[in-house]
Amino acid sequence: MPNVSSTTWDYVIVGAGSAGCVLANRLSADGRHSVLLLEAGPPDRYPWIHVPIGYAKTMFNPVYNWCFKTEPEPQMNGREVYWPSGKTLGGSSSINGLIYIRGQHEDYEHWAALGNPGWSYRDVLPYFRKLEHNMRGESEYHGIGGPLWASDIVAKHELVEALIAAGGELGIPANPDFNGATQEGVGYYQLTTRRGFRCSTATAYLRPARGRSNLCIETGAQATRIAIERGRAAAVAYRRDGRDVTATARREVILAAGALQSPQLLQLSGIGRADLLRNFGIPVVHELPGVGENLQDHLQARVIFRCTKPITTNDVLASKLRTLAMGMRYVLTRTGQMAIGINQGGMFARTDPALGRPDVQFHLATLSSDMAGSPVHTFSGFTLSVCQLRPQSRGHVRIKSPDPLAAPAMQPNYLSAPHDRATIVRGVRLARKLAGTPALAPYVMGEYRPGPDATTDEAILAFVRDKGATIFHPVGTCKMGPAADPRAVVDSELRVHGLDAIRVVDGSVMPTLVSGNTNAPVIMIAEKAADLILARAVP
Ligand SMILES: Cc1cc2nc3c(=O)[nH]c(=O)nc-3n(C[C@H](O)[C@H](O)[C@H](O)COP(=O)(O)OP(=O)(O)OC[C@H]3O[C@@H](n4cnc5c(N)ncnc54)[C@H](O)[C@@H]3O)c2cc1C
């Protein structure tokens, strides 16, 4: 018989990721409420988590990363696509690429138009300003004094400069701030780093709150089920050190286990599509067909060029002396390649001039490798990764076993929409056009991937099917929307439809994927959720 114990809290938060750490801090701040934060992974003590270039050290590390794989993808040559996901304090913000992007103003207008009052750009901007401490100072679009640092890449890189000039030659404007008035253009990214270290939500939000007597953080604690009593979330069952524990929630249970595991946990608890639950012998507690549906992700096609000059990170890592110099520079000044990570430059562009706003994002990495985070090539190389911003393909996350410790089936259905296939092909063509401009061509010795033979649309698409990968933004599986929407799982206050005292607060609530990277938008969601929760909390 397992050793069973039980505790009681005002709020029980499942998952200490980008969203969960924000909630833990904000809900425990005034000392009125007791908060339990459950995290399946270990503490974030591994030093490489905190050094930006350590990205490569956590990318395939099963201690800090769930290392998921999708189901075989029909449009991707039946491949199981590798899906990393953070498994430690900070969640994916502890292993991500540090790029600080909010998305386009229109993304949030669209959320509001879908029947979600309170989520227009005007509504969410104050939360984006609240969460950040922007190195550039305060402005209409930016805040200072918030927990999450947004830092500039101070050192210029020849390749990013060349990309900015190349964009200019194609009529794509230089944009010094992708998170300002408009996203379109080319420039340097800002990074979520603080004085050369990663600024995860664990360091930004949890560390300052750790000492509070009303906040308890349990690591190695995997939630296995939510207990629903008379339509109300009453408790969370979890496993820790082989023991089954129950945490009772006086006020609310908040799921922040990410877009892959929040819907899984709902399904394991009998909340979801009735046919799916019955298949696995799980009693249907509350039928909610949208749970796990509406999965969306950004697919990236990494176009790789051999570089004419030994100025890439590949060259640094190929030489012991240069690697040592890079290390010394970091130790002494907290700058240089080790403080940057992978991607330095970005571009938001329209693959068709008739479009009203950018439909693709480019990440410029001053290095090249077969997969993101795998060892770099031995030649001088750089990567222009192309990503379609608003894919129309939809997939799902569904349990494939009643075992709470088994991964669910993840099926993004990449490229299933014809529009997505056409956009990614146009994006790859745009990457080539950039490489052929007078500004960038002097740096291009040749195209390594897909390679000069891939000239037709079919050949480019074949390359994407064969080598395309996630850019790590699965969202949408507990869609926010009005009750009349058959796919909606939570309302505009992130409360699960039809149940009491349970919310989902993480990337899964996005009704549609934002046009950009997802960490800052998830943190914004959690900041707003904390206000929504506390506004209802009677002392
Ligand atoms: C490799 C990688 C690179 C990325 N690069 C960028 C980037 O450069 N910029 C950007 O903006 N975004 C990036 N992203 C995406 C971004 O980091 C995520 O969208 C965001 O962190 C998701 O936040 P979340 O709170 O929804 O989930 P997560 O941060 O993933 O948090 C979920 C947490 O819940 C825990 N958990 C899960 N199930 C349970 C359970 N049953 N019980 C207890 N705990 C549980 C997990 O271990 C995890 O800690 C990247 C993501 C990855 C994986």
Image (cartoon, grey):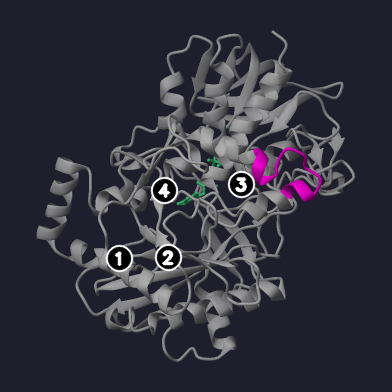
Q: Amino acid at mark 1?
A: Val
Q: Are marks 2 and 1 in contact (CB under 8 Å)?
A: no
- Front position among marks 3 and 1: 1
Instruction: Please state the horizontal and vertical placement of residue 223, each as a whole percent of the image.
Output: 62, 30
Mark 2 close to ligand 1, CB under 8 Å: no
Of helix, strand and loop, which one carries label 3?
loop
- In screen coordinates, is 293 left or right of 82? right
Q: Secondary structure at mark 1?
A: loop
Badge 4 vs badge 3, beta-carbon distance below 8 Å: no
Marks 2 and 4, how far apart at CA: 21 Å
Q: Residues within 10 Å of mark 3 (few under 14, many from 20)?
A: some
Residue on which the image places disc 4: 98
Specify whether tag 1 is near ligand 1 (CB below 8 Å): no
Q: Is residue 121 left or right of residue 335?
A: right
N-terminal label among 4 and 3: 4
User: Gap in Å between the C-alphas at discs 2 and 3?
Assistant: 43 Å
Query: From the viewer's perspective, is the residue at label 2 or at label 1 nearer?
Result: 2
Q: Give the mark, 2 or 1, whose residue is nearer the N terminus.
A: 2
- Near mark 2 (Cα within 10 A), the count class, few <14, some 14-19 or many ≥20, is some
Q: Is residue 110 above or below residue 495?
A: below
Tell me the amino acid under the disc marked 4.
Leu
Badge 1: residue crowd in 10 Å (few <14, some 14–19, many ≥20): many
Report, in whole angstroms, how far the alpha carbon at label 2 lies from the one at label 1. 29 Å
Q: In this figure, which residue is indicated by the disc labeled 3?
A: 407
Give whichever of discs 3 and 1 has the lower sequence position.
Answer: 1
Mark 4: C-beta under 8 Å from nearest atom of ligand 1: yes
Identify residue for label 1. 376
Is residue 359 among what the camera can see? yes
Q: Amino acid at mark 3?
A: Ala
Q: Position of residue 333 (x, y in %)?
A: 17, 42
Which of these two is toward me, 230 or 502? 502
